[in-house]
Amino acid sequence: QVQLVESGGGVVRPGGSLRLSCVASGFSFGSFGMHWVRQAPGKGPEWVVFTRYDGSNKYYADSVKGRFTISRDNSKNTLFLQMNSLRAEDTAVYHCAKDKYSSSPNALDFWGQGTMVSVSS
Amino acid sequence: QSVLTQPPSVSAAPGQKVTISCSGSRSNIGNNFVSWYQHLPGTAPKLLIYENDKRPSGIPDRFSGSKSGTSAIVGITGLQTGDEADYYCGTWDSSLSVVVFGGGTKVTVL
């Protein structure tokens, strides 16, 4: 079965950095687009970024553009999110999610449980 | 303020039907597929409907989706206590080049 396991969250000061990882199993990771989606406490999901199956095309939410970078290592079935210049408003649970298809954002058909990122002084 | 508009809550008795609307614009719902997600507290969100009206394997046919113009609807028939959750619509916005979600609708089984 499809499994997505995120790690790397924690508490960080404003302006700091974190790198999230998501290890995938149960499907051909290198054949599908992948997303990061975050959910702040008490709020709905906010989409963060998408990368196509080969990492050659990426789309970012305006709120993170220039600060966050998505990457993937298909040889290790792992998705990454490098987060720099973190702000209080980045505080959320970060989920990685598999897209149903390979190249363009469509439906997010499997989600991980998420890893908590807290930005606080 | 979400790009897609959903009612904050809907409710019905067990066995009844509820529908949740999702309103957008031409650049998102009007020209792209809509998905629906169920989120139970403490769990990962689950895909309920994709490409407007398709159900993934394992999703019962009590759940249905439709789209017309710049609005979409998900329906739940034979409501069960296990259906109490937050439901979100989502789609691609071609003008903004981002995925957008609705603000979410809480379903309560009376």
Image: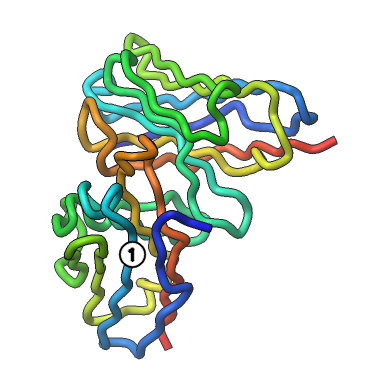
In front here: B16 or B81?
Answer: B16
Q: Quadrant of residue B14?
A: bottom left
Q: Is residue A1 visible?
A: no
Pick out the residue farthest to the right. Answer: A121
Residue at disc 1, secondary structure: strand
| Residue under the point 54% across and 38% down | A94
Q: Nearer the viewer, residue B31 or A71?
A: B31
Q: Nearer the viewer, residue B87 or B66?
A: B66
x and y percent of residue B72 in the render? Answer: 25, 64
Q: Residue B39: where, in percent of width, then height?
A: 42, 59
Choose between A41 and A8: the one closer to the eye.
A41
Instruction: Write down the chain letter for disc 1.
Output: B
Residue at image coords 43%, 69%: B105
Quadrant containing the C terminus of chain B is bottom left
Query: Looking at the picture, how far across and down is residue B9, in whole percent?
Result: 45, 77
Q: Give the side of residue A30 with respect to residue A91, left or right.
A: left
Residue placed under numbered mark 1 in the picture: B23
Classify A79 as above or below A47.
above
Q: Residues within 10 Å of mark 1 (few under 14, many from 20)?
A: many
Residue occupying image coordinates x 17% and y 50% = B51
Residue A76 image point, x, y percent: 37, 12
Q: Is residue B54 left or right of residue A63?
A: left
Quarter where residue A47 is shown: top left
Is B62 located above or below residue A3 in the figure? below
Q: Is residue A99 left or right of residue B5?
A: left
How many circles with numbers are drawn on the protein?
Answer: 1
- Residue A88 in view here: yes
Residue at the image point whose x is 63% and y is 54% from the top: A41
Q: Amino acid at mark 1?
A: Ser
Is residue B5 positioned above or below B46 on the image? below
